[in-house]
Amino acid sequence: MIEEQPIIVITPETLVEKVQEMQKQGHRLVQIGATPLKDIIEVNYSFDKDGQFQSLRVQVPGTGAILPSVSAVYWCAFIYENELHDLFGIDVQGIAVDFKGKFYKTAVRFPFAPKTPEDKPAAAASK
Amino acid sequence: MSRTIVPFGPQHPVLPEPIHLDLVVEDEKVVEAIPSIGFIHRGLEKLVEVKEFQEFVYVAERVCGICSFIHGQTYCQAIEEIMNIPVPPRAKYLRTIWGEMSRIHSHLLWLGLMADAFGFESLFMHSWRIRELLLDIIEATAGGRVIFGSCKVGGVRRDIDAETMKTVLARIDEIEKQMREITKVFINDSSVKSRLVGVGVLSRDDAYSLGCVGPMLRASGVAQDTRHLGYAAFDEIKVKPVTHNDGDSYARCVVRCQELFQAVDIIREAAAKIPDGEIAVKVTGNPNGEFSARTEQPRGEVIYYVKANGTKNLQRFRVRTPTFANIPAMVKTLQGCDLADVPVLVLTIDPCISCTER
């Protein structure tokens, strides 16, 4: 392995507090990314300081998930948080620059969200 | 004063690819810029569900047509880390050489686009003429001018023999001479300076807190370069980040000019040190685990997050491209600028919408 990449699992309730701690310690927000699993979504908040890479991980339900925005701590988070909404259907509340679902223009609503049996592509549903 | 919204893009002469900005202006001053992307979002990340992990290198290379090689390389590195695959040293050096060729090719492309944006047509043509010479080398060594198709999980597909390497180095010498001529103009010409100096200043603290990467970050005085992590042959070839302290569009131009010659030096050093031996190892089994691979693209740090569960198809593949990370900084630098400076400021981050719309 070139580098260790610790992952700290936290809860949505402590997310903003933990991100604030990272910011106070001088970490750079590298990315926020989501991984849809069977019926949950893992959201990784990755940071870097002096080349050391680490992530905070939050697990939310696959549908109807709500997360607080961290854009008051890292303003640049708005771009990732709009992506979390538009591609995964996560309702991120309090985004500094909220595009309200218009950041990505996708043919299918929430295309990367975990699929449920009743899901149908938007194009098929509209017929 | 009343405010007006001026739409910029998605089709605009300085934009090779579509991005849209709503520019809120008071008279000729931009007070707010609201970006909008997603016009050509391709959903490539979703393809991991149907492509096997070894096939997916081809998809990763097609995330971007400019820094295609490093996209493929970063994807391979993520898989190799998870599977603990010992990549042969010769393959690591070949990856380094092709990666730095990509950097030269990308920076020359940007310099040409920037010259075109500020109306210096002959400088634009010379930048792209020199870039063609480099593309010829890439074609001779990799087989393709833009999509290399040379990286694979476990190593590389092609070798560069000693005779070809000599020819490559001789051509690189010639390209370096010609780059010296054009970069003199970019760095010293008064008309270039009048369009770039003091435009879009980004302080060191802002560049860091906004999550900037690559030349955008280094031009604001932050000495950060992912090559320090020692991937490929960078554990043996040391790179000193090229920085500038002014944080304006001129500083970003100077950093890219200097990085051209840094890349030439790296290619020479890699060619001198490249060991003999195999160029790939056989890969058996399927990946199981997760890893975030990081490399330094011409535009800055790229992140490839891969999560696998022991099957041929990955659970998740995510790429955070440098342009995506630099968009918040672009929005910040546009606030308060003159409307006439918007094209320069949009180009100054070296936007790659193809990457962003992966």
Image (tube, grey):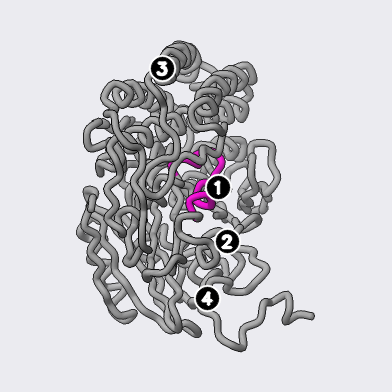
Cα distance, mark 4 to mark 2? Answer: 13 Å
Front disc: 2 or 1: 1
Q: Which residue is mark 1?
A: B62
For badge 3, the amino acid type reads Glu
Residue B106 coordinates in the image, percent (x, y): 50, 33
Q: Which mark is residue B163?
A: 3
Chain ID of residue with mark 1 = B
**Is the C-beta separation of discs 4 and 1 under 8 Å?**
no
Residue at (22% x, 33% y) in the render: B236
Cα distance, mark 2 to mark 1? Answer: 12 Å
**Is the C-beta separation of discs 1 and 3 under 8 Å?**
no
Q: Secondary structure at mark 3?
A: helix
Tell which circle, 1 or 3, labels the residue nearer the N-terminal end: 1
Residue at (58% x, 71% y) in the render: A111
Q: Which mark is residue B150?
A: none
Q: Does mark 2 fall on the same chain as mark 3?
A: yes
Residue B67 belongs to the span the image colors magenta: yes
Chain ID of residue with mark 3 = B
